[in-house]
Amino acid sequence: MNLPLSAVDDDELAALLPRLNDDDASVRRLALIELAELEDEAHLPWLLAALTDGDADVRAEAAGRIGCWESPATVEALLRGLDDAAAAVRLAAAQSLTELRLADSGRRLLPALAHASPFVRASVLRALRELRLPEACEAALEAARAAEAGVRLEAVGVLGWLKRSEALPVLTGLATGDADPEVRRAAVGALGLAVDDSVLPALLRALGDPVWQVREEAATTLGKLRLGAALEALVDALEDDYWQVRLRAARTLGRLKDGRAVQPLVASALGHSSANLRKEAAIALGEIAHPAALDGLQRALADSDPEVRKAARLAIGLVQAGKA
């Protein structure tokens, strides 16, 4: 790396510098690891310098190590790392960017959303997600219309974390019409930010999506919003080909606490071959706490799975307490 020996008044750094400058890249990389593990911010310039090393493994190690030291120089170095010729360096830089926690760091990332590379744009959006930077909303709305599915997916993540009502029309469109199932699934989940039933048509349509993961997410989001108007569609979802969708539908029906769901839960879920689904059905019946569930729950006390039996006992107690 040809790191300078001058102006070094740190004994630990001085001891490592010969190895950091060694001709053998594996020696340089191990020395870099030791330097990073000293966790001394004064060593950051040497870690940043390693991002220009001639060996990709050394650069990747440096990119993966500097995210915990948040500074303008770190952000700029990691952005350059997203353009590195080596995929390992690009991936390490992208991961380190997700460790940023300061709003000022997020603002330094925003210009990169105009980058020509879809990987760079997607990586920056992923880094912005948990920062919840209001200034990122407009850029994320624009990115949600990108040609690349990976960029759209990360844009949905930003919009979901920001919880801005103006994003709902865009998210609704993606949830019901995007060509990529992962984008649809993420958009369906992000619709949970709604405060009313305006997203109900989109979620009901998503319950019929050809991809089961999207259907599962729709049932989950309906549970978060507790939209009673979805009862019939959720009852239908108890007959889904995938038990994972049935499980989420059962969970949501429990949250709706509507007695009309008792019979379908007993008939379609409480006797299913999946123990996880049977357990979830028992829990849901306990939440609904309707006397009509008692017969089915009593039978579940003889279930082969101890977790199902436990859930049935607890549910029976809730039903009986509701009758008192």
Image (cartoon, rainbow, N blue to C red):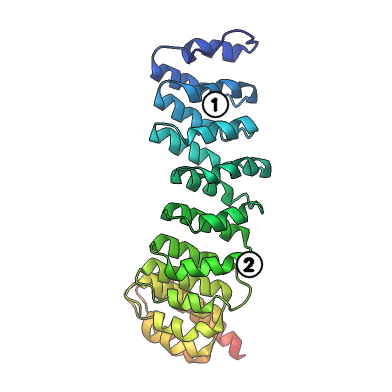
Task: Name the element at disc 1.
Answer: helix
In the picture, the quarter occupied by the C terminus is bottom right
Q: Position of residue 95 (x, y in %)?
A: 49, 41
Q: Please, what is the three-letter code of the amino acid marked with disc 1?
A: Glu
Q: Nearer the viewer, residue 245 or 179?
A: 179
Compared across the picture, whether 275 is left or right of 283 comes to: left
Compared with 268, 55 (above or below) is above
Number of residues whose C-alpha sits closer than 10 Å to that of mark 2, classed few (under 14), some (14–19) or many (20 or more): few
Residue sitting at 64 percent across and 26 percent down? 41
Q: Which mark is on residue 186?
A: none
C-alpha gap between disc 1 and disc 2: 44 Å
Q: Is residue 55 at all visible to an observer of this figure?
A: yes
Q: Are marks 1 and 2 in contact (CB under 8 Å)?
A: no
Q: Categorize mark 1 by other alpha carbons within 10 Å: few (<14), some (14-19), many (20+).
A: few
Residue that carries the numbered disc 2 in the rendered image? 165
Q: Which residue is mark 1?
A: 37
Q: Quadrant of residue 100?
A: top right
Looking at the image, which is closer to me, 313 or 213?
213
Q: Earlier in the sequence, mark 1 or mark 2?
A: 1
Residue at x-position 37% and y-position 77%: 303
- Left or right? Give the position of 100 relative to 119: right
> Which residue is painted at 60% across and 27% down in the image?
39
Q: Nearer the viewer, mark 1 or mark 2?
A: 2
Q: Is residue 306 above or below residue 125?
A: below
Percent coordinates x, y for residue 127 in the rendering? 55, 46
Give percent across and percent down for residue 54: 42, 20
